[in-house]
Amino acid sequence: MLRRFVLASVLCAAFGAAHAQLPAPVAQMLAQQGLPEDALGVLVLKGDSVLLSHGADRPMQPASTMKLVTTLVSLERLGPAFRARTELRTSGQVDGSVLRGDLFLKGGADADFSGEALETMLRALRYRGISRIEGKLVLDRSLWQPARMDLGQPPFDESPEAYYNVIPDALLVNKNMLQIDLRSTAKRLQLQMQPALDRVSIGSSMTLVDADCARWEDGWKLPEAVRQQDGRIKVLLHGTFPKDCARSYSINVLDRDDYLERLFRQQWKELGGKFSGTVVAGNTPADSTLLAEHSSRLLPELVRDTNKPSDNLLARTLFLSLGSLAPEGAATSAVPTVEGETSFARADAAVRAWMRAQRIDDAGFVIENGSGLSRLERITPQQMAYLLQAGLRSPWMPEFLASMPIAGIDGTLRRRLQGSPAAGRARLKTGTLRNVVALAGYVPDANGVQNVFVAMVNSEQAGNGRGRAVLDALVDWVARSGAAPGAEVLPAPAMPVLPEAAAAGR
């Protein structure tokens, strides 16, 4: 710990010194893209040495690179064997084929809870011989406080129906998404919706137009869910759609209580069950009986699916779980809870406690939801770099590294840095907002020596590829560093593609 503290002091002293001047290719790219040098914050560490530092102690918007904080702390705190769990429980008694009492669906922040999982749980009731439920269905989201964080929240942008904008809760099924299939001829638009929900239909006021099918979203307008007097709900699509076009799109427009209730009623009916009770929100009694359960995938798989495609909902789910869940077998949470304390406050405390244990100063650090989809979140390149160094020391380092996109190969980096010596070698998390472009992770140099890499551009002019061009030039410079003068540095060889994989378009 003392060595780590001394190293931190040495690095801090170096930030304002000899490494502040930007490499010529990067400075030239900044000028070419019309971006000022103070829009860029960079820290590149080669072992215990500073290779490059520029504005490294300034809190900046990280965009989705904040997911590295959430996922590494999740691995460290919850462990690689962690699984979240959804439970179906009752406080009643089974009398022949009748369940006399309430049925509780208890959420455990299970990111994999799907319609198929719910059907399997309900099928387990049928296997027990239960065909009728005489009681209420109680939806228990009490793991997180407030239980419905989405209520009253203003939309982040103009696409609140999009998946990336879904706000999590502890009992979210199918991520609350409806998959819509749109198919048009010259005169007619056909719509299909999945999953089937009790007394929910789909309709459209869309106009068919002569337009490029590839640009169908140009005519898309915000859909809505209209509740009718008889209790039915109609999902209505608006805008225009190209003639002779077929597309599939997922939308989040139903209130999540409606979604879960109507999915339950539909599936229970299809399984031959009967239920005429009401559906309410509530808490599960401590002495209730477990009837069925579903567990999520192991945490490393969720971490990979968070970082590779940059999944905001998964990141937000993991972040909130940090303050509410503990590894299996743990007696208590590592962060004490206070009565009435929000799940956000507990998660924030868990992240800061981990940072301080790693001797990372959290001054200026702001974490709102752990995904980076935020105008408020801030982190310095220095803090992010120290976190990445901690990732290399972590016993779960292989799982952490394996979650990051590989330059030119997969995830959000699959089309970037191709032809650079970083291709196939660098593992970097991307981050993009309207005014933010960021990269953070690990970049080997020309000799294969690993560099911790953090770079962020914060500017209203960062979009339209300008900030990305600067950061790609910086990654390329790091990947070429250490080479002998005049030596050619080549990208990693292309990965072989198996015939069956190529045929499947994977």
Image (tube, rainbow, N blue to C red):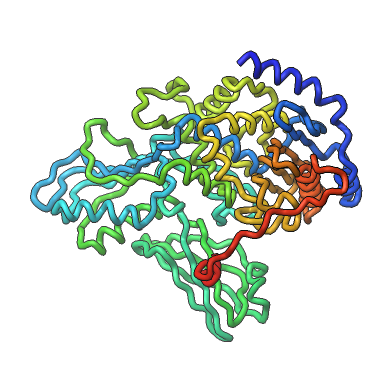
Please say if 492 is above or below 223: above
Furthest residue to the top? 2
Q: Is residue 81 above or below residue 245?
A: above
Q: Residue at x 32, y 36 (%)?
A: 283
Query: Residue 362 or 77: which is nearer the viewer?
Result: 77
Q: How many marks?
A: 0
Question: In the displayed structure, does residue 409 sit left or right of residue 138?
Answer: right
For this view, does 164 lie left or right of residue 80?
A: right
Q: What is the x, y in percent for residue 371?
A: 59, 41
Q: Quadrant of residue 138?
A: top left
- Residue 138 in view: no
Which residue in the rendered view is the most extreme toward the left? 96
Q: Nearer the viewer, residue 375 or 80?
A: 80
Percent from the top left, x then y, of residue 217?
64, 67
Residue 415, percent across and down? 68, 58
Q: Quadrant of the N terminus?
A: top right
Residue 16: x %, y % from top left: 84, 25
The foreground one among 86 and 147 is 86
Q: Residue at x 40, y 63 (%)?
A: 195
Q: Nearer the viewer, residue 280 or 304?
A: 304
422 left or right of 370? right
- The residue lying at 51 percent from left, 56 percent from top is 252
Tell me which corner region of the image, top left, top right, bottom left or bottom right, holds residue 388. Answer: top right
